[in-house]
Every structure is written in structure tokens, then in C-alpha cells.
Image (cartoon, rainbow, N blue to C red):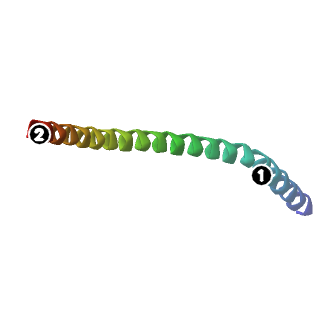
Amino acid sequence: MHTSAILFAVFVVFGSIIISAAAPVDKSENIRNAAYYSLKDASSRERRNMRSSNKFDLEREIALFQHSNFLISV
């Protein structure tokens, strides 16, 4: 009876040591993946914002050009 309890305790202790030793590898992998995907999302969001702001800048430049042509013709 005592032997099986001691073996169970040893099994639990070594099992928890093995699991805790393996956990940082999984956590670092998850952190690395999360960082990669958050950077990827940020860069695609930044590209989207740049496209929309470039479109706005282009429309503003065209409007200014048309206005300056109108002033020159008058």
C-alpha cells in the first residue's frame, strides 16, 4: 500500500517536472507566432492606411491642380 502511494507520488512529481520543463518551449513558440502575426497584421493595416491616404493625397493634388488651372485661365 505504501509502496504504490510512494510510486504514485514519484510519478506525479516527475510528471510535473517534465511538463513544466516542456511548457516554456511551447510558450515561447506561441509568443513568437503571436508577435509574427501581430506584426503582419500591423504592416497590412499600415499598407491599407497608406493606400487610402495616398488616394486622398492624389485626389487633393488633382483638385489643387484643377483649381490652379482655373485661376490661370481666369
Q: Nearer the viewer, residue 23 or 70?
A: 70
| Nearer to me, 17 or 1 | 17
* Residue identifier under label 1: 20
Q: Is residue 3 left or right of residue 62?
A: right
Q: Residues within 10 Å of mark 1 (few under 14, many from 20)?
A: few
**Which amino acid type is marked by label 1?**
Ser
Name the spot of residue 23 as percent of width and height, x first. 72, 48
Compared with residue 21, is residue 40 higher up or lower down, i.e. above or below?
above
At a point 63% along the width and 42% down the height, the residue shown is: 32
Q: Which SS class for mark 1?
A: helix
Name the quadrant containing residue 53.
top left
Residue 9, percent across and down? 85, 59
Left or right placement of residue 19 versus residue 52 in this view:
right
Q: Earlier in the sequence, mark 2 or mark 1?
A: 1
Which quadrant is the C terminus positioned in?
Answer: top left
CA–CA distance between discs 2 and 1?
A: 74 Å
Residue 3 percent location from the top left of the image? 91, 58
Which label sits in the foreground, 2 or 1?
A: 2
Query: Which amino acid type is marked by label 2?
Result: Phe
User: Which disc number belongs to residue 71?
Assistant: none
Q: Residue at x 62, y 45 (%)?
A: 30
Tell me what residue is drawn at x 67 percent, y 48 percent: 27
Q: Can you name the residue that lies furthest to the left here?
A: 74
Q: Which quadrant would the N terminus be assigned to in this image?
A: bottom right
Front-most of residues 21 and 15: 21
Residues under numbered marks 2 and 1 in contact, where contact means CB atoms less than 8 Å apart: no
Q: Element type at marker 2?
A: helix
Disc 2 crowd rating (10 Å Cα; few below 14, some 14-19, many 20+) is few
Please state the horizontal and vertical placement of residue 44, each as a whole percent of the image: 42, 39
For residue 70, the mark is 2
